[in-house]
């Protein structure tokens, strides 16, 4: 880095520390751009891949009302992907890249998305649990990201968070119906909770304290966390988010009489800090690097629909030519 | 000039970097008494397609009163500090004249006292 760029980076950091925002056309250090692109791509692709597990239940939803609501939710998630991909594209443009690169990377296994979307959804309770507890986790992350320094991302997030409020109510409503239902329905939800708990505990990523550092690919994760905090792209650590999540959801789950499959899980009454069985971070890394149980099937499905939709994009984009 | 003549605004909106798709900025008026405000940006092959995507992608939940899509290339923007900088011109602002409230109170008070004496 030449001294000039160093000065500029210093000024940029001071600008951030004063609480200012950054716009797409503003000068920014390469590292800032790179962290943003990485984060927003991950977010965008997670929204898009997140439609796939839930859409499996659209044809099998138990009532018409549930089917319509689930379709509306899936449509919202696709819309979130659209919003975010545009934000990412404006940042990628100086490198001559656009959404095609994101999709190519996804199909080639080079683009990560959230661990939860690599997993199977065997029952209706799993679908409801995603709406309640996965969207619940997502909104905690997204609410925190609203305080970030990159203005175009925070604008997109404001729209997204507004719609997430519906997603959570929708998920809660499904889970509440099961909780108040027959013994069979309660057992179905309990099974889903047991299945999903480890994935929910890893959703926010490893803590910063080094307990999860490893030589495996993805071990650089925690340094991205530090860089994002410094750039005010994020304002809270992974562990802070997980603690907030536990405080919000553990009491609710327990109040419905369900058992969280971690006998060590407890909150210190004075410090309010939750302790829990350390999650299997190796397994988490395997999942997000496309070695999850449904990784290949979902990426292939996305690839197929992308290829089959090519003619639509061709027709739409040729409109001006045809006139 | 028709919109399809070379060099027209419509012609310029056709980009070269991403097939025939262009970035459009979406603006909408979301309340009857509100103003048209920026909402989002999207990629589309024509203004009609941009309008349709804007309605479907960003505005499907709310009633809207007006909807604009503008090719990003057609937007002229103020650049840099020179065009955005504003001299402090407090004489334009109501707050500079707040002292008048005190003056009036004072005159009112004086007049009341005069009336009472009379
Ligand atoms: Fe979403
Ligand atoms: Fe959602």
Image (tube, rainbow, N blue to C red):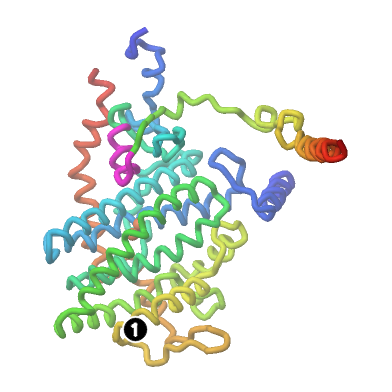
Q: Position of residue A217 (x, y in %)?
A: 44, 68
Image quadrant where one finds the C terminus of chain A: top left
The location of residue B16, given as percent across then percent down, is 38, 27
B108 relative position to B11: left or right: right
Q: Residue at x 54, y 47 (%)?
A: A151
Residue A12's x, y, as percent?
67, 49
Q: Is residue A299 visible?
A: yes
Report the predominant secondary structure element of the magenta stretch: helix
Which stretch is magenta?
A: B51-63
Image position of B43 with respect to A142: above or below: above
Give how far across and how far down residue A256 sits, in percent.
30, 82
In the rendered structure, the answer to whether residue A294 lies left or right of residue B25 reads left
On screen, residue A310 above or below A145: above
From the viewer's perspective, is residue B9 above or below residue A64? above
Q: Nearer the viewer, residue A64 or A124?
A: A64
Chain holding disc 1: A
Is residue B102 found inside the magenta-colored segment of the image?
no
Seen in the image, is A190 located left or right of residue A83?
Answer: left
- The residue sitting at the bottom extreme is A263
Residue that mark 1 sits on: A255
- Left or right: A89 with respect to B115? left
Task: Please tell me which residue lies in front, A312 or A290.
Answer: A312
Residue at 19 percent across and 50 percent down: it is: A304
């Amino acid at each position: 880095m030449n001294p000039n760029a160093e000065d500029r980076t210093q000024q940029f950091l001071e600008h951030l520390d004063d609480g200012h925002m950054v716009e797409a056309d503003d000068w920014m250090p390469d590292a800032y751009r790179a962290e943003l692109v990485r984060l927003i791509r991950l977010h965008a692709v997670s929204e898009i891949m997140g439609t796939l597990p839930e859409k499996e239940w659209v044809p099998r939803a138990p009532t018409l009302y549930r089917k319509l609501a689930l379709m509306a939710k899936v449509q919202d998630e696709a819309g979130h992907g659209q919003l975010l991909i545009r934000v990412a594209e404006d940042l990628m443009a100086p490198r001559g890249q656009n959404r095609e690169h994101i999709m190519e990377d996804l199909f080639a296994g080079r683009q990560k998305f959230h661990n939860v979307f690599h997993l199977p959804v065997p029952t209706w309770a799993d679908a409801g649990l995603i709406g309640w507890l996965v969207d619940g986790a997502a909104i905690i992350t997204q609410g925190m990201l609203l305080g970030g320094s990159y203005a175009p991302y925070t604008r997109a997030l404001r729209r997204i968070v507004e719609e997430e409020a519906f997603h959570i109510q929708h998920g809660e409503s499904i889970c509440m119906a099961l909780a108040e239902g027959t013994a069979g329905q309660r057992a179905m939800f309990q099974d889903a909770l047991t299945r999903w708990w480890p994935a929910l505990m890893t959703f926010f990523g490893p803590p910063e304290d080094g307990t999860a550092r490893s030589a495996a690919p993805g071990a650089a994760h925690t340094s991205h966390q530090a860089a994002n905090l410094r750039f005010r792209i994020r304002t809270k650590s992974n562990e802070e988010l997980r603690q907030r999540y536990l405080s919000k959801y553990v009491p609710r789950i327990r109040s419905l009489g369900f058992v969280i499959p971690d006998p060590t899980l407890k909150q210190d009454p004075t410090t309010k800090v939750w302790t829990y069985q350390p999650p299997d971070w190796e397994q988490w890394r395997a999942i997000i690097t496309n070695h999850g149980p449904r990784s290949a099937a979902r990426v292939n499905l996305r690839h197929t629909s992308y290829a089959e939709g090519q003619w639509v994009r061709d027709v739409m984009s040729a409109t001006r030519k045809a006139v | 000039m028709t919109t399809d003549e070379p060099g027209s605004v419509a012609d310029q909106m056709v980009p070269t970097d991403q097939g025939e798709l262009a970035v459009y900025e979406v603006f909408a008026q979301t309340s009857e008494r509100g103003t048209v405000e920026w909402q989002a940006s999207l990629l589309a092959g024509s203004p009609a397609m941009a309008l349709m995507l804007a309605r479907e992608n960003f505005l499907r939940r709310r009633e809207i009163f007006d909807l604009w899509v503008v090719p990003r290339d057609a937007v002229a923007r103020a650049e840099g500090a020179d065009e955005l900088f504003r001299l402090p011109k407090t004489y334009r602002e109501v707050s500079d004249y707040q002292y008048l409230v005190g003056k009036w109170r004072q005159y009112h008070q004086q007049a009341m006292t005069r009336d009472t004496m009379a």
